[in-house]
Amino acid sequence: MRHFTRCLMGAALLVSVGSSAHAADDTRVGLVPGGPHPYFAAWDQAAKDAVRDFGLAGADYKVPQKWELTQQNQLLESMLSQGYNGFLIFPGDSVGTVSTVSEIVGNGAPVVTGAGCLKDPSEAAFCLGTDTGNSAYLGTKELLKVLGQGKRIAHFTGFLVDPNTQLRIDAVERAAKEGGATVVQVIADIDAPEPAEEKINAYLAAHAGEIDGIVTTAWVPAVVSANALRKIGDKRIKMVGIDHDEVVLKAIKDGFVSGTMLQNPYGQGYVGAFALDKLRKGCTVKADAPFKSNALTAKFIDSGTIFVGSDKVDTYVDAMRDETKKLLAGFDTTYLTCP
C-alpha cells in the first residue's frame, strides 16, 4: 500500500501538469474490470466509441491477469502513474476496493464503478450497472411463464466474491416463491469454464430428471448450461440464461433455451466514460439525483436489462443500442450539475 501511495503522489503531479496544459481535452479514462471475463469485452468498443464521440484524449480497457484484488490495485496504480485521470472500475471487492478508490479520487481522478458497486460509504461518484436483482427476478419470472406453478428449478450463478451474486440468489428465490416454484439447487462460484463444466455437468448427470427448469445469472454458467442441454438433447428442461454469448443465442434459436436476460456492458462503458469526462470538467453529482438503491449503495443507476426470446434473438444488438441511447439521453441534466 505504501508503494501504491507513492505512485499516486507522482501521478497526482502528472495529472496536475496535464490539466493546466490541456484543460479542455485531456481526459484519459481507464476501464478496469476485476479480472478476465467475456462480459467486460464490450467495454473495449465502448472506450473507442467514447473517444470518437466525446472527444476524449484517450480511453483504454485494461484487464488484470487474475481475479485478485492485489492485481487490480497494481494495474490501477500503474495506469494512474501513466496519466489516466478518470476510472470506470468493477470493484474486485465491494469493501476492499473502497480504500483504493478513495486514494485515487484523493489524487484528482474521479471514479465511477461499473457492473458492480462498492459498499457505502465510498468516494465513487455513483455505481452504473445492471440491477442484478431485478434482472434475476425478471428472468425467473420469464422461466415461470413457460413452466407454470409447482415446478422445481436449479439456479447456476457467479463468483461469491462478486457483490452481485447474493443479490441474484435472493431475487431468484423470491421470484420462485411468488410463482409457486421451488429452487431445489443453487450452485455458485462457477463463473469460469473449468468449475462450471465440472459442477453443472455433474449435477445434470445425477439430477436432470428431478428438475423442470434452469435459470442462470452469470455468463459462463449460461454458456455451459446451454451446451449441456444441447448435448443431452433435453428440451423438456426449460432454461432462461443471461447475456449474449453466441452459444446461448444459438441455443435459443434451436429451442434448447427459452431466452436470455440481456445486460448492457457497452452502455456502462460508453456512458461511464461520458460521465467521467463531465466530472473532470467541473460537473458535480446532483445531491437530489434520482438514484436507485441496492444492498450496497444508495447511488445506483440501472444501465438497463431486457428479455430476449426466440422472436428477438436476431435483433438483440438493436435492443442493446436502444438501452444505451435511453441511458445517455438526458444523463447529464438528470444526474449532474455542470458549470
Image (cartoon, helix red, strand yellow):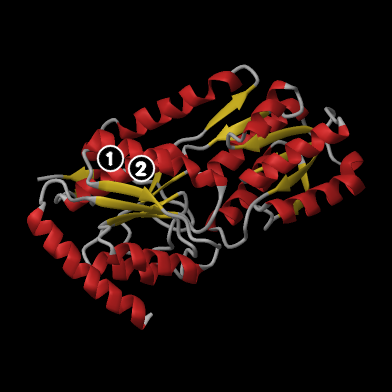
Q: Is residue 57 shown above or below 304?
A: below
CB atoms of marks 1 and 2 within 8 Å: yes
Q: Is residue 105 left or right of residue 100?
A: left
The part of the image, by quadrant, that contains residue 195 is bottom right
Please give the label number shown on residue 47.
2
Question: Visible in this render: residue 121?
Answer: no
Q: Nearer the viewer, residue 7 or 305?
A: 7
The part of the image, by quadrant, that contains residue 302 is top left
- Kind of residue at badge 1: Val
- What secondary structure is found at the residue carrying circle 1? helix
Q: Is residue 208 left or right of residue 266?
A: right
Query: Looking at the picture, how far across and down is residue 238, in whole percent?
Result: 77, 31
Question: Visible in this render: residue 71?
Answer: yes
Q: Is residue 123 left or right of residue 143?
A: left
Label 2 environment density (alpha carbons within 10 Å; few <14, some 14–19, many ≥20): many
Q: Is residue 214 left or right of residue 69?
A: right
Query: Looking at the picture, how far across and down is residue 202, in whole percent?
Result: 85, 51
Label 1 environment density (alpha carbons within 10 Å; few <14, some 14–19, many ≥20): many
- Kind of residue at badge 2: Ala
Q: Residue sitting at 31 percent across and 68 percent down?
A: 102
Q: Nearer the viewer, residue 312 or 293?
A: 312
Name the residue tied to disc 1.
Answer: 51
Q: Nearer the viewer, residue 79 or 324?
A: 79
Q: Nearer the viewer, residue 308 or 183?
A: 308
What's the CA distance linking mark 1 and mark 2? 6 Å
Outermost top residue: 311
Query: Looking at the picture, how far across and down is residue 322, in whole percent?
Result: 41, 25
